[in-house]
Amino acid sequence: MALNPYFQQGAKNEQSLVQSLINEQLRMYGVEVHYLPRKYMTENTVIREVIQSKFDDAYPLEAYVDTYDGYAENPVLMTKFGIEGTNEITLTISRERWETYIQPLMKNEANVKLTTRPKEGDLVYFPLGDRLFEIKYVEHEKPFYQLQKTYVYELRCELFRYEDEVIDTGIAAIDDELVGDDIADGTTEDGISTILGVTQTLTMVGAGVTAAAYTGIITSGAISYFKISNRGGGYIGIPTVGVSSAPSGGVTGIATIGEMISGIQYCNLNVNSAFKSVQEIHIINPGAGYTVVPGVEFTNQGEGSGVAATSFISDNTLGIVTVTASGSGFTTAPTVTFPAPDSIAKTGIGTTAAAVAIMNAAGKINNVWYTNTGSGYTTGDLPIYATFSIPGGTGTGNFQFNEVVTGGTSGTTARVRVWRSDTNILELNNVAGTFIIGETLTGASSGATHDIRLIDTEIGETEEYADNFNIETEADKILDFSESNPFGMP
């Protein structure tokens, strides 16, 4: 039996009234979220798996929090494989607002697969919890055709787990989700990394600033140098140097192995190319008050053996070096020189001190250790300052969070997660290519330029379920979906 023609079934005015009432309710009781459409940058041709995606647009939109029953502690089931129950919320948005506001803005966007409705896989930024949620299902028929029309979209969302997507909306509150807990330097007070996803660490060369240091004079009984009588061999690690205690009232000297050498065979101890021998001993503290030369003993030798050395003492040597400016921009340890003692010019007797600079990973000078503390220095030589060679670094500027950096030689690109200017450590994500030591990285937004000094070959995965990345990598070696169907063409 046909519907009664004397009653309106879904008149347009009535539908508009219902939609307007819903829109008003959402504006009054909703939350202003941001909708982030997923852009598909790279896909496999066989099973259409998305390899790389990007989120660089964010549209503000009012949404009503319908349910948040699943928003609680994440019940992890099998941590080894990352099986868990994630936090969930259900949001309701206006269909009319989507069709008149968001759809026209997305319509001409490249790499967006669907614009006529919200899409599974897109993200929603929820400001009250400062979190990103991924849309898992879009319900578009609830309530079910009141007055023969639907008026809302129901978005069922789960807490977003970041992998290697590019998130660059230009809205700081959203983009900083890439660094957990919004910690700018990417590290908690306990030193735990909060950077999300797979990252690569580079140590850059800072701006060239020379170092500065000074020292004093030890008038009697200081260690002047060590003479190695047997280099030993078979060492995997570095042995420890021990020096006999100074007499009462004196200061015991401190020394360390300055350099190990490999590639030589001594008494067949270094047949294995990984084995090393002792090449040089450095003096950290010359001590004072020795009346006879102190003995030298080597401990923590591990598999190695045979190293032996003799110490020598002198009067009027240089003392512990105090570094007053660590400098920056050193690509290799700079040469260190000390002035010659006045006694050489006056009497021809004396020895000019010699030392080496100890450089940290950031290209700065931590310490200055002696190979020879010299002799013949007097108070007439004071003050005594070390002179360092000019650093070779020409780095300038500071990289900005989330900007693209490009290697000048390799053309490799990546995005900045954290730049620590004090240590010149650069944490990168979305690396496309392979960086080369010595090449210059340039920031697309900041214009900062720094040369690469060290590359951490261990790719860091800071996610809780790091094994997922390893499992996927190994699986890709077995089945390659990138070119053809590994199971055979139909």
Image (cartoon, helix red, strand yellow):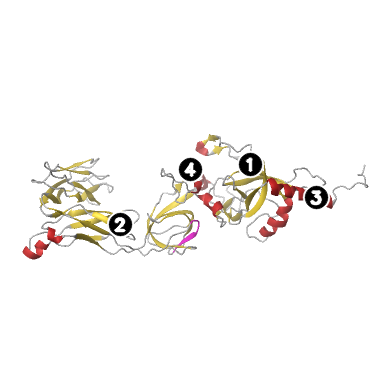
* Label located before the other in sequence (2 or 3): 3
Secondary structure under badge 4?
A: loop
Q: Are marks 2 and 3 in contact (CB under 8 Å)?
A: no
The mark that comes first in sequence, 2 or 4, is 2
Bounds of the magenta span? 401-407
Depth check, mark 4 against mark 3: the one in front is 3
Find numbered disc 3 in the image and state the secondary structure of the residue it sits on: helix
> 10 Å neighbourhood of mark 4: few (<14), some, or many (≥20)?
some
**Residue at 10% of width from left, 58% of height from top?**
376
Q: Amino acid at mark 4?
A: Ala
Q: Residues within 10 Å of mark 3 (few under 14, many from 20)?
A: few
Q: Is residue 157 above or below residue 338?
A: above
Q: Name the quarter where the N terminus is drawn.
A: top right
Residue identifier under label 3: 17
Q: Is disc 2 surrounded by few (<14), some (14 to 19) or many (20+) residues within 10 Å? A: some
Q: Earlier in the sequence, mark 1 or mark 2?
A: 1
Residue ID for mark 1: 89
Residue beneath disc 4: 466
Labels 2, 4: front one: 2
Q: Is residue 416 magenta?
A: no
Foreground tag (3 vs 1):
3
Is 270 on the left-hand or right-hand side of 201?
left
* Marks 4/3: CA–CA distance: 52 Å
Q: Is residue 211 visible?
A: yes
Q: Which mark is residue 326?
A: 2
